[in-house]
Image (cartoon, helix red, strand yellow):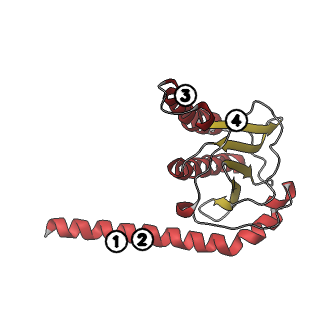
Amino acid sequence: MKALVTFKKKLEERIESLTSELKELQDTLDVVNSVLLEKGFKRGDIKKVAVIPEEAAPSAKVVVTAEEKPAPRPAEPESVIPLKTVNEEPLAIIYVEKQTLHILPDESKKFSVSTPPFNNFLVERVLAKMQEKDSELVRMGQLTPDKMFAYNIVREDDSLREIVIQNVDEERLRELKSSIRWTLEKMYEKMKS
């Protein structure tokens, strides 16, 4: 009986979590056009945009360059994934274009690459670790160099303009979405205080 009560509580918590996620996805679908018009289209002219939930997002792959210039804006992304705070404040938009992710921070926020936890968490603990793991797989012959995870942080002076990420599978896409959202939300909280 005790085990069933515990199991019932876990089921209720899971249902609540999924309901919350579904509401977030429905809200995102409702507002994505206005968000894109207000924030996202300033850097490119995107004619057709399809919004999909993160679970259905296609696998994406990306490559890193050492340049500080932004990558050319995709004409028609396969999907757009908005990242928002708990209070529905826009943080960034992820464009999924074939095998490339373009993470574009909300222009009104003016995120600085020196604001924690950008470098010590997102860059060092998430992006660099994924790249190190793939480097090891390449050394062991289990992955070809052209399939290796890579990233490029595009900045203008101290301002974050874009993060370009290559060679990302669906599991990493979910992890990256979560890590980037958390990082930008923490940075935004520090900017406001």
Q: Marks 4 and 1, how far apart in space?
A: 43 Å
**Which corner quadrant holds the N terminus?**
bottom left
Circles 3, 4 touching at the beta carbon (< 8 Å): no
Circle 1 SS class: helix
Give the residue at mark 3.
135
Earlier sequence position, callout 3 versus callout 2: 2
Of the two numbered discs 4 and 1 on the same chain, state the one appearing first in sequence.
Answer: 1
Q: Residues within 10 Å of mark 4 (few under 14, many from 20)?
A: some
Read off the residue under disc 4.
Answer: 64
Q: Which mark is residue 12?
A: 1
Nearest the viewer among 92 and 151 is 151
SS for callout 4: loop
Amino acid type indicated by mark 3: Ser
Q: CA distance from mark 1 to mark 3?
A: 42 Å
Report how many numbered discs are placed on residues in the image.
Answer: 4
| Image disc number at residue 179 | none
In this figure, which residue is indicated by the disc labeled 2?
16
The residue at 56%/50% (across/down) is 173
Q: Is the residue under label 4 in contact with that under label 2 (CB below 8 Å)?
A: no
Q: Cα distance, mark 3 to mark 4?
A: 13 Å
Q: What secondary structure is found at the residue carrying circle 2?
A: helix
Residue shown at the point (62%, 64%) measured from the top left: 87
Which numbered disc flags the more N-terminal residue, 2 or 4?
A: 2
Marks 1/2 in contact by CB < 8 Å: the verdict is: yes
Q: CA distance from mark 2 to mark 4?
A: 39 Å
Q: In the image, residue 78 lies at what x, y percent?
A: 69, 60
Q: Is residue 4 left or right of residue 133?
A: left
Query: Residue 186: x percent and y percent?
Result: 62, 48
Left or right, residue 36 beside residue 29: right
Which amino acid is tagged 1?
Glu
Identify the residue at the far left of this view.
1
